[in-house]
Amino acid sequence: MGRFASTASFYEHLRPPYPSEFFRSVAHKLGLSRHSSLIDLGTGPGLLALGFAPYVGRIVGVDPEPAMLDAARRAAASAGQALTLIEGKSETLTHDIGNFDVVTIGRALHWMDREPTLARLDRLVAHDGAIAICASFSATDGSNAWLDGYNEIRRRWSPARLWEEAGRGTRTHRDLPTFFRGSAFAPTELVAVETSHAVSVQDLTQRVLTYSSSSPEALGDNVGVALRDVENHLVSFHHDGAITETIVSMAEIVKR
């Protein structure tokens, strides 16, 4: 069982969402059409793949975790969307998969082995295609007054090794010039969309369980007490049971 197996049932509905205007903005920037093809690496429950579905003709999702692929399959069926799903990693994709106009990667780049991933991307990305490294997260500019305390509680309950690993992943995601250095690719531009939505205290508390460093598997017998700790922190910020969350959704465009 992979480290995200125990998060699959929470991930789709509880992570900070990508708004429709994000997909529209990125699709416009990349000039996507129904003739375009897209492959989403580390697709999880298919959030990016299905979000871009209205703008492309062919979609493939790749993930090593069967539970995540099951969630993506259900989401695609619910949306009435054709989605080809492959169990595996980017580094192990076969050569006959062809190339794509867009390769999307969410918060998964730090799980990929750099050298084989770069070699695979060189074959996956069409000659004039692009890579979109995407993330949607709670804004850290102070607009989410509850966030620092929330993350501190997550850190306190997470196994130290996993919390440090998560920190390295965030740094990798933000330092794309270093990741792509020496390859055929380089970051070229950034698409950022800021939105806000109301999220219930219960859902924001449960979101803790969607992260590998504080998943049910990672927390073990401490799940209940960790969630109570988070909820007790959040109750002072809610209005009628909900908290307004400011979200930043970003796509860093990488091209040859």
Image: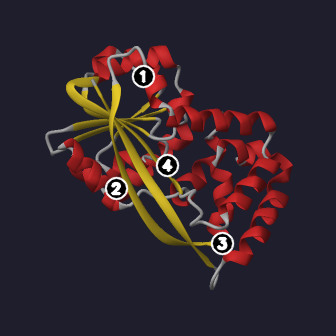
Q: Which of 124 and 185 is in front in this view?
A: 185
* Mark 1–mark 3 CB contact (< 8 Å): no
Single out the mark in the foreground, 4 or 2: 2
Residue at position x 81%, y 63% in the image: 229
Rendered location of residue 120, percent (x, y): 38, 18
Residue at position x 62%, y 41% in the image: 5
Q: Is residue 227 left or right of residue 192?
A: right
Work out whether mark 2 precedes mark 3 in sequence or the reverse, and give the earlier one: 2
Q: Is residue 64 left or right of residue 155?
A: left
Q: Residues within 10 Å of mark 3 (few under 14, many from 20)?
A: many
Q: In this view, does 65 lie to the left or right of 6?
A: left
Rendered location of residue 180, percent (x, y): 42, 22
Q: Nearer the viewer, residue 183 or 16?
A: 183
Single out the mark in the foreground, 2 or 1: 1
Q: What residue type is labelled 1?
A: Phe
* Mark 2–mark 1 CB contact (< 8 Å): no
Work out whether mark 4 precedes mark 2 in sequence or the reverse, and give the earlier one: 2
Identify the secondary structure beneath mark 3. Answer: helix
* Mark 4–mark 2 CB contact (< 8 Å): no
How far is mark 2 from mark 1, CA to CA?
24 Å
* Mark 3–mark 4 CB contact (< 8 Å): no
The circle drawn on residue 71 is: 4
Single out the mark in the foreground, 1 or 4: 1
Q: Which amino acid does label 2 sit on?
A: Phe
Name the residue that disc number 2 marks.
22
Name the residue that disc number 1 marks.
180
Rendered location of residue 64, percent (x, y): 52, 31
Name the residue that disc number 3 marks.
201
